[in-house]
Image (spheres, rainbow, N blue to C red):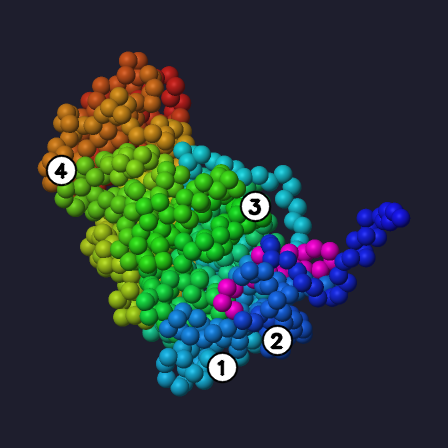
């Protein structure tokens, strides 16, 4: 007898589960909406019990609903999973995970601690993440910490927010600016607009940054590199500012707690999932303006700190998998200098990091990443640097990330320094040697002539051995970590007293100079010299082969009062005071003009090293510079753009003026003056195409500590001498 055929709908209805809580599936990780409910999936190899808690409000201590995972039914391999009916976008949730508490064997499970989902795409705001005496615990320590380990912290813990919105990207697509046309602007989302002088409607937020897009377009940058926007605890920094008596804050954010979640406090619309939408709006608006978005990502450590740090996420889910541990596994390897090190080359952790990168590219439309202390990502579980680190190779070769810009901070705090040799060619690198050599040359240090010449040409001495080109070099003079450009020429020593560490923190090797007095001055001579040096640095950065990166605010002389490690200064020390823009508009104008100049002369940014055919070197009296003389601080270089155009760049880092001999011009051309950093505005920089004729074809007078650019072109193409 044949069984009657059933419709697919009836068949599915007959055999499907109909309970509100079901087995669920192991993939994808995190939360995923399906069939009128949400699937929750969490990795933990060594857990014995997992509980999902659902909350109605961010500061609730008691969950509205508790779902315990069955060890057999809700577990596939190392993945715990459950499907729950009726969950909607905005639902708050978190986990508790139980298992062995054996610190010396690497296990730190504690069912008293509420845990964040490592795949959460939004984290709720809480008034204060500082858990007081319950912040750290370790059962190998005295009884006080044993008591702390049993304190339930649900009320103080933020909760994960389930998000499932459909965002209308319109026609947004990756911009894919080539490296040769990229100018990066490093900035901090909050600090960029939180100061009242920013005059934005939504200060300190993603939307506030959107309001400054016309400014960024006017400046001419092509990418913003955002300091960490992954969720972090700004209240985790202990201590008081000894100068003001106010608490210190984690301002920079280099201590992430969730790799998929944008920082909630940077959202003007709210912290219950709105942060994700507002971030997307910001990216879409920047793309519409032709500006790429690069995220500074921290995959080398987390905010859970050392053995006495808080349990927030990874530590309580599976400590021995996610972190590198010492032989006595109670302790953490500390290659980041922050207490712990992510076990980045464990296959599970590797996949987690790759998943985060793909998420930010696919879901959030970001254009690239700068990897903090990236050398750590190339260490194996014992801390040894790998020749072909699997994670670094997978990032470079991942098909989804293929168009993303990837930038390495090619060192760590444990001694690795891989500038010039970091992984494969697709990886670009922050060129720390560029920063130091350019600073030392303009400070007037001996023996810097040849190194300076190499740096402006793309650092072939650093990159050719590994088969990389000048586009692998992210050139910078200043960044968030260190002096601002103004402070580089205003302070001989760091002044970090406000950090509460007796001025012991921050680097001592700043290669800076104050030119007569420490800090601000009313001395017109010192001020003129500082202004000229700032222009020298900006000119050098923007004529150098490689990819220039500006620190935001340098274009209007933002100061941190000599603090070169303002990680904990969420105040006027770090915030952008936009009144400086009017006070120092000359520097803004010069920066904008040099970006225009770079764009107008693509020979300066080609993704190949110069050859002897297109660059020639000159000393002040003609002939080759005396490279071997450590006292030599003056030279020029002639760069041929084509058969009718050439650039002559002249540099003088000495305290003496020089009459610099000009090389013969191309037939039918004359020299025109483009830039001279010693001149008063507006004669210091002329608009592209408006450079005036230089009457003396033989000599150019170059002032002390100054630089100049002349260009050879046909006289009839000049349209006058209007300055920018």
Vertically, is 47 above or below 603? below
Q: Which residue is mark 4?
A: 632
Residue 201 at what x, y percent from top left? 57, 56
Q: Which residue is mark 2?
A: 60
Kindly identify the residue that appears in the image at 38 percent across and 44 percent down. Answer: 549
Q: Is residue 191 visible?
A: yes
Crowding near the residue tagged with mark 3, few <14, some 14–19, many ≥20 C-alpha atoms within 10 Å: few
Q: Quadrant of residue 344?
A: bottom left
Q: Which residue is mark 1?
A: 150
Distance between the Cα atoms at labels 1 and 3?
40 Å
Q: Are marks 4 and 2 in contact (CB under 8 Å)?
A: no
Distance between the Cα atoms at labels 4 and 2?
69 Å
Q: Which residue is mark 3?
A: 362
Distance between the Cα atoms at labels 1 and 4?
67 Å
Secondary element at image label 3: helix
Q: Are marks 1 and 4 in contact (CB under 8 Å)?
A: no
Q: Is residue 10 left or right of residue 309?
A: right
Crowding near the residue tagged with mark 1, few <14, some 14–19, many ≥20 C-alpha atoms within 10 Å: some
Q: Is residue 538 visible?
A: no
Crowding near the residue tagged with mark 4, few <14, some 14–19, many ≥20 C-alpha atoms within 10 Å: many
Vertically, is 48 above or below 697? below
Which of the two discs, 3 and 2, labels the residue nearer the N terminus? 2
Residue 476 at what x, y percent from top left? 33, 45
Question: Over which residues does the magenta segment extend?
Answer: 29-47
Q: Are marks 1 and 2 in contact (CB under 8 Å)?
A: no
Kindly identify the residue that appears in the image at 44 percent across and 66 percent down. Answer: 319
Which of the two discs, 1 and 2, labels the residue nearer the N terminus? 2
Q: Quadrant of residue 278?
A: bottom right
């Amino acid at each position: 007898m044949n069984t009657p055929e059933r419709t697919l709908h009836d068949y599915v209805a007959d055999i499907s589960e109909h309970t509100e809580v079901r087995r669920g599936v192991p993939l994808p990780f995190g939360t995923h909406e399906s069939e009128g409910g949400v699937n929750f999936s969490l990795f933990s190899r060594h857990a014995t019990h997992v509980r999902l808690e659902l909350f109605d409000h961010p500061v609730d201590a008691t969950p509205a609903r508790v779902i315990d995972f069955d060890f057999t039914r809700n577990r596939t391999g190392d993945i715990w999973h459950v499907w729950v009916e009726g969950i909607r976008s905005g639902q708050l949730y978190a986990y508790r995970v139980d298992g062995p508490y054996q610190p010396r064997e690497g296990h730190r499970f504690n069912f008293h601690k509420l845990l964040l989902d490592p795949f959460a795409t939004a984290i709720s705001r809480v008034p204060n993440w500082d858990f007081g005496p319950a912040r750290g615990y370790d059962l190998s320590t005295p009884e006080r910490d044993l008591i702390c380990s049993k304190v339930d912290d649900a009320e103080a813990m933020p909760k994960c927010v389930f998000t499932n919105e459909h965002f209308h990207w319109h026609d947004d697509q990756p911009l894919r600016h080539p490296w040769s046309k990229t100018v990066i602007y490093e900035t901090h989302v909050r600090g960029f607009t939180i100061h009242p002088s920013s005059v934005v409607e939504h200060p300190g937020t993603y939307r506030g940054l959107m309001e400054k897009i016309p400014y960024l377009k006017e400046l001419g940058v092509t990418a913003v590199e955002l300091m960490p926007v992954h969720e972090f605890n700004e209240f985790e920094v202990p201590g008081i500012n000894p100068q003001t008596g106010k608490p210190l804050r984690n301002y920079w954010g280099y201590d992430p707690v969730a790799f998929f979640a944008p920082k909630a406090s940077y959202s003007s619309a709210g912290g219950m999932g709105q942060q994700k939408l507002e971030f997307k709006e910001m990216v879409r608006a920047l793309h519409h303006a032709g500006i790429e978005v690069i995220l500074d990502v921290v995959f080398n450590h987390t905010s859970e700190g050392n053995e006495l740090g808080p349990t927030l996420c990874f530590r309580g889910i599976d400590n021995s998998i996610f972190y590198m541990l010492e032989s006595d596994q109670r302790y953490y390897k500390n290659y980041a200098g922050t207490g712990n090190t992510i076990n980045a080359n464990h296959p599970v952790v590797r996949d987690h990091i790759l998943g985060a990168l793909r998420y930010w590219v696919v879901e959030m439309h970001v254009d690239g990443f700068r990897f903090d202390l990236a050398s750590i990502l190339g260490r194996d579980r014992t801390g040894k640097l790998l020749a072909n680190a699997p994670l670094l190779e997978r990032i470079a070769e991942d098909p989804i990330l293929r168009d993303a810009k990837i930038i390495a901070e090619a060192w760590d705090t444990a001694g690795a320094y891989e500038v010039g040799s970091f992984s494969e060619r697709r990886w670009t690198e922050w060129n720390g040697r560029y920063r130091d050599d350019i600073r030392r040359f303009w400070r007037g240090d001996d023996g810097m002539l040849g190194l300076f010449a190499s740096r402006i040409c793309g650092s072939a001495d650093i990159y050719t051995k590994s088969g990389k080109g000048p586009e692998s070099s992210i050139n910078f003079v200043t960044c968030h970590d260190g002096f601002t450009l103004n402070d580089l020429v205003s302070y001989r020593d760091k002044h970090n007293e406000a950090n509460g560490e007796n001025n012991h923190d921050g680097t001592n090797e700043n290669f800076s100079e104050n030119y007569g007095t420490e800090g601000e001055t009313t001395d017109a001579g010192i001020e003129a010299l500082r202004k000229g040096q700032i222009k020298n640095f900006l000119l050098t950065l923007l004529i150098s082969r490689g990819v220039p990166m500006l620190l935001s605010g340098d274009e209007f002389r933002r100061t941190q009062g000599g603090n070169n490690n303002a990680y904990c200064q969420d105040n006027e020390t770090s915030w952008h005071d936009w009144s400086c823009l009017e006070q120092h508009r000359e520097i803004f104008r010069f920066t904008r003009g040099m970006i225009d100049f770079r764009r107008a002369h693509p020979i300066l940014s080609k993704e190949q090293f110069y050859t002897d055919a297109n660059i020639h070197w000159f000393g002040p009296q003609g002939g080759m510079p005396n490279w071997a003389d450590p006292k030599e601080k003056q030279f020029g270089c002639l760069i041929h753009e084509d058969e009718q155009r050439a650039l002559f760049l002249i540099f003088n880092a000495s305290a003496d003026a020089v009459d610099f001999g000009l090389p013969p011009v191309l037939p039918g051309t004359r020299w025109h003056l483009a830039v001279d950093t010693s001149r008063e505005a507006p004669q210091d920089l002329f608009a592209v195409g408006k450079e005036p004729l230089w009457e003396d074809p033989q000599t150019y007078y170059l002032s002390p500590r100054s630089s100049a650019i002349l260009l050879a072109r046909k006289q009839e193409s000049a349209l006058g001498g209007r300055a920018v």
